[in-house]
Image (cartoon, grey):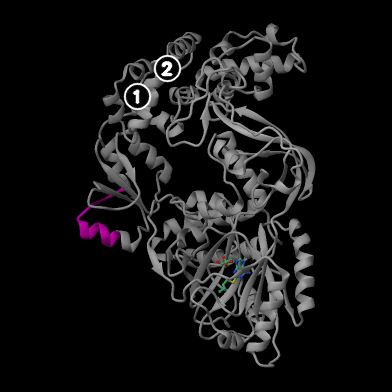
Amino acid sequence: MTDIERIDQLREELHRHNYNYYVLNSPEISDYEFDKLMHELQDLERKHPEYYDENSPTMRVGSDINKNFTQVTHKYPMLSLSNTYSETEVSEFYERIRKSLEGEDFEICCEMKYDGTSISLTYEHGKLVKAVTRGDGEKGDDVTNNVKTIRSIPLILYGKDYPDNFEIRGEILMPWLVFEQLNKEREDNEEPLFANPRNAASGTLKLQNSAIVASRKLDAYLYYLLGDNLPSDGHYENLKFAEQWGFKVSQIMCKCKTLQEIFDFIQYWDVERKNLPVATDGIVLKVNSLKQQLNLGYTAKSPRWAIAYKFQAERALTRLNSISYQVGRTGTITPVANLDPVQLSGTVVKRASLHNADIIEGLDLHIGDIVYVEKGGEIIPKITGVDKDARFMIGEKVKFITYCPECGSKLIRYEGEAAHYCPNETACPPQIKGKIEHFISRRAMDIDGLGSETVDQFYQQGLIKDAADLYSLKAENIISLDRMGEKSAENIINGIENSKKVPFERVLFALGIRFVGETVAKKLARAFKNMEALEQATLEELKLVDEIGEKIAHSILFYFSNEGNRQLVKRLKEAGLEMQVSKEDLQRQTEKLKGQSIVISGVFAHHSRDEYKVLIERHGGKNVGSISSKTSFILAGDNMGPSKLEKAHKLGIKIMNEDEFLTLIE
Ligand code: IVH
């Protein structure tokens, strides 16, 4: 078999395995075997760039090329549906249809209303050519590369009986399990959480880096076929055809003839939807015949032949007993309502988030009030209202606290911010513990064997007051603590000892300076090379560093202006932590690419794209996403896209191959 024949064979096989796994949920081969085939195909495609195919299964892994989205005008505008929350309005809709169709028989197709972000996919000759978001309904963003990473969306269709040209619309969703996992990771990294799977899905779809999109495991259900030569007059029947072409179409669809059948469907799925892997927020009712749809027509905003019945957000009434205030690592105060336990969507709710002082004020909350608690799409329940009729004796009005509940410091509220803060960074217990927890976390010092409970225990016992105290702990100090065996004590001490090898940039991140995340820490380490230089840096020097602006620079100055922080850093240095960039790193670093903006494009033989990124940064250059007149040169591998090539030629930008680049930085 020639390489080309093998490429064809692999592409076909991988498309099929992909469909079996992501659409049918019934894989035939193991993940390992799948990955092996994918790697074989990647290698062969690299060897034969002339055999590039934009719909190859290898496109599923995404790429880290930054690309701003281009706006595309929808061929058919993406309308919305009129919403209703009441069964009466469903009956009225049904009656309206019956009257307008003047006695013709009709069927209503009932299906789930998926709560994600909508997408329009265009297929030509059986291939996915474009994926566009809803945008404003007229124009949306071209997110084709990101959508290609969604495994349940076919890149190439099955069979032959699909129209040459058609659009199919549907919903992109983040399954609950993926959403929960993602938020857990974000919590660990102190990144803001997504409020619900819908926000997570739409946020993910708009990411510039499709390799990250690929890692987020989005799913998609398709529910609307548009085009001139559709196989049937029935909406339901068309979707069944689409299923045969490889699309993931919801199995929850029912053609109803009577109003009673519609209500049965609604009532059944209002309960049963809790067992679905993705979020839904209602039922969509559509007149099934396309001819009748055409007859019924559209208003300016929505079709007359469809309506969405939205489920009542689940809510419960319960009593507000008190408010607690939590203090976070950076001193943010979060008010939490303590409630009489109440059953809501299958769990018992005892607490609900109140977010900030403005929300409390807006609700006009009093202790003892009977309040509405809702779960909606969010995971943390919230209070959405007060049943004022149930107020027999009005309790004390809830007033936001003015002093920190943990340390007694007067709270502050920055101009334009909703949150209150406790400013006592160095002596407020939850802030201290939070800082130590951040210090030991995986991405910072990564201390094996130590978790937040142990930190809490050490703190309670007076063994540690800050991160530097960890380095004077001895096994005999901790062995006597609760649930601490000899082995775990030893593990912890070894973990602490090993953390002394953690590179400087992570030590810098571990300090927990506000606004200094991993990336900023890396940039600072590279620019200043050691802690001393950073401590002495002026505002101007800090701002000279790539991506460091006024806000971050001030925060760094503020951190080092505090005597307590300077002492902490000094003690960490004495404990033997890395306070400078390693010799190897320094040696490897040059300024050969200083001031140059470099675009990486194509597939490489000697290093991965990520490795090239590191090399560019190490030699003082900047990796940028898209070609502009400011681009210094393009580091091009095989398969550089034709539009990029054209743009580069037009702007007269030099194209450098891998070998030339490696010689340049040698
Ligand atoms: S049909 C012209 N079917 O609801 C009708 N929409 O408010 C086109 N949605 O933007 C839409 N599930 O994102 C249709 N089974 C379903 C749906 C659905 C969710 C969303 C869609 C649309 C919005 C309409």
The residue that mark 1 highlights is 586
Crowding near pointer 1: few (<14 within 10 Å), some, many (20+)?
Answer: few
Q: Which residue is found at the position 52% from the left and 55% from the top?
A: 202
Q: Nearer the viewer, residue 26 or 180?
A: 180
Q: Quadrant of the C terminus?
A: top left
Give x and y (percent) for residue 477.
Answer: 68, 7
Mark 2–mark 1 CB contact (< 8 Å) = no
Give the foreground label among 2 and 1: 2
Give x and y (percent) for residue 304.
Answer: 58, 79
Tell me if residue 528 is in the magenta stretch.
no
Left or right side of 305 for 581: left
Which tag, 2 or 1, sits closer to the chain's start? 2
CA gap between label 2 and label 1 equals: 13 Å
Left or right side of 19 for 252: right
Q: Is residue 326 above or below residue 100?
A: above
Left or right side of 13 for 629: left
Amino acid type at image mark 1: Leu
Point out which mark residue 579 bears: 2
Q: Secondary structure at mark 1?
A: helix
What residue occupies the far left of the structure in this picture?
652
Give x and y (percent) for residue 589.
Answer: 32, 29
Which portion, as a residue range, is magenta?
645-657
